[in-house]
Every structure is written in C-alpha cells, then in structure tokens.
Image (cartoon, helix red, strand yellow):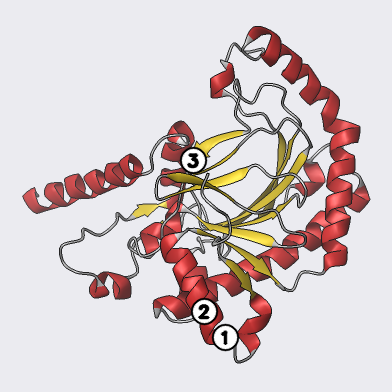
Amino acid sequence: MASTLSFPIIDMGLLGGEGRPAAMELLRDACENWGFFEILNHGISTELMDEVEKMTKDHYKRVREQRFLEFARKTLKDGCDAQGVKAEDLDWESTFFVRHLPESNIGEIPDLDDDYRRVMRQFAAELEKLAERLLDLLCENLGLEKGYLTRAFRGSSGAPTFGTKVSSYPPCPRPDLVKGLRAHTDAGGIILLFQDDCVGGLQLLKDGEWVDVPPMRHSIVVNLGDQLEVITNGRYKSVLHRVVAQTDGNRMSIASFYNPGGDAVISPAPALVEQEDTGRGTYPRFVFEDYMKLYVRHKFEAKEPRFEAFKSMETETSTRIAIA
C-alpha cells in the first residue's frame, strides 16, 4: 500500500493571504497528477456538517439498516443477491440519491423527516457554492476566463445537474467476497465528498498502486470527473477509485456531484487545445446526457473506450458531411 502522507491536502484559508501561490500550486499539482485532493477551511460550518452526519447516521439506523441486513444475509449465504447477481458484481453499500438541480426531488423521497430535508437542503446550497468556487480556482490555474467551467456545465435550463449520493458502508465479514464499491471513474464534473472521519476505505489508483484517501474531521474530499478531463483536453484527469469493504465500523459517505446539464455540449476548451502539442489528439465533443447513457452501461470499465466511441462518432459524422 502506498503512503497517504503525500496525499494533497489544501488549506483554503491560505488562498486569501501570502500563502495563496503555494496553495494554488498544490491545487494545480493535485488536479494534474492525482485527480483527488482534500480541502480544509472550505467555508462550510462544522456545526452544519455535524448535524448532517448525525441525521444521516440516524436515518440509516432507523430506515435502511434492516433492509441492508436482509441483502447481506442473502449475499453471504448464496453468493448472490435476490436477482441472482453474483457477489463480485455487487457493492456492499446502502444508498439513496437526492437531486438538487435543475429541480429538487428531496420532497418526494420517502422516509426522510422534515428536519433531515431542511438540513440536506442547507448543506446542498453550501456545496453548490463551494463547487463553483473550486471551478473558478481551476479556471485560474488553467488560464481560462473566470466562470468558463460553470458556464460550460449549464444546459438549456441555465443550471447544472447537481445531486447527492448518500451511502453507508456497513461492516462486511467477507471483504474477500464483495467490494464496498467497485473501481470506477466518475462520469461528471467535480465531486465533493463529506466522508466518515473514523472509518476509512476510499482508495484511488496512482502510479499503479492503490492509495488511501485519509479520513479527516470536517474536511471535504474533491475529485475530478470525466467531463473535466475532456474540457481540459487531458490536462486534468479523472482517476479510478474504489471503496474497500471494512470488517469494522459503518462508513458514512455523502458524495455530491456537480455535473453538466443534460443537454450541455461538452468539448475541450479551445484555449487549452491551442496550448497542446500537435501530437496529442484532442478529446471528443458530445452532449452530456449521451455520455451518461454510455456510462451507465460501462461504469466499472475503463473510461478510454467511452472517449474513443464519441471520437469515432465525430469522425463518421465529419466523413458523411464531406461526402455530401
């Protein structure tokens, strides 16, 4: 196991003073060489984070635990779930998803009490602001105009797609049999994770080794999705990551995905294409919802064939136009 000591941790409080150049350089290196980083002093109150954590863990115990235990018994006994899916193709997680933008569905999710809904709305609003702040910092490092990335993510509604996956990873007596969450890259834009500070398990692949993402109290873990790799023309990379099931402890994970709108057209930023050596081929141009249709069928596979599929479509379209 590679050391976590060099894992990039960025104190956003330094951005307002003399430490800004060093913090921006750490951010650049994290985006170019890790695809992950962890931020402190990000502006979200610790009181709000504590409230979110308490309510999320209480909700699991009250609503979701019994359902998960039934799934666990079946999987461990038979080596598959009730639908016959083998254990190696399953994830040891209990999860639900909340959509915030372009329209919220939090009022439609059963079994959430009013206080939990209120707190999650408040938390989502803070995360949305933080995501847009981070995207502007990325623009600064990339030499792009401020707001370029947030504008690139807006669909015809003028809003991104923004939602939160709330997960629990309960203790697993057979981590050799089933993964917590299988290795994948994230399809979207920028992902902000509020994770358990006591129970680990999140790992990323760097230089052929799995590296632990260190749990830290009141931090936010940030990772880059496939869309930022495309827009930056490969300057920034989405990276494979996974959750290793643990024999002890119930790991909380609240991952919020700030993604392009469904009909947003994604392509490399022209300014970044011009900066690249001519030997590197540019990434494809596509509509985000088309990418997602491909992603959901191949989530746990390499990302490169997804990019190549859209590049092939572009080539075929250009050929047809030329012939016509």
Q: Which residue is mark 1?
A: 20
Identified by mark 3, the residue type is His
Q: CA distance from mark 2 to mark 3?
A: 27 Å
Q: Position of residue 246 (x, y in %)?
A: 70, 33
Q: Position of residue 155 (x, y in %)?
A: 50, 60
Q: Which residue is mark 3?
A: 184
Secondary element at image label 3? strand
Q: CA distance from mark 1 to mark 3?
A: 32 Å
Discs 2/3, front: 2
Q: Is residue 239 above or below residue 190?
A: above
Q: Residues within 10 Å of mark 3 (few under 14, many from 20)?
A: some
Q: Residue at x 65, y 76 (%)?
A: 12
**Residues under numbered marks 2 and 1 in contact, where contact means CB atoms less than 8 Å apart:** yes
Q: Residue 305 got which mark?
A: none
Q: Residue at x 31, y 76 (%)?
A: 271
Q: Position of residue 216 (x, y in %)?
A: 72, 58
Q: Residue furthest top?
A: 78
Q: Residue at x 82, y 60 (%)?
A: 49
Q: Which residue is mark 2?
A: 24
Q: Position of residue 9 (x, y in %)?
A: 61, 67
Q: Nearer the viewer, residue 165 or 45?
A: 45
Q: Nearer the viewer, residue 148 or 247?
A: 247
The quarter of the picture where residue 63 lies is: top right
Q: Is residue 138 above or below residue 297?
A: below
Identified by mark 2, the residue type is Met
Identified by mark 1, the residue type is Arg
Q: Nearer the viewer, residue 170 or 272?
A: 170
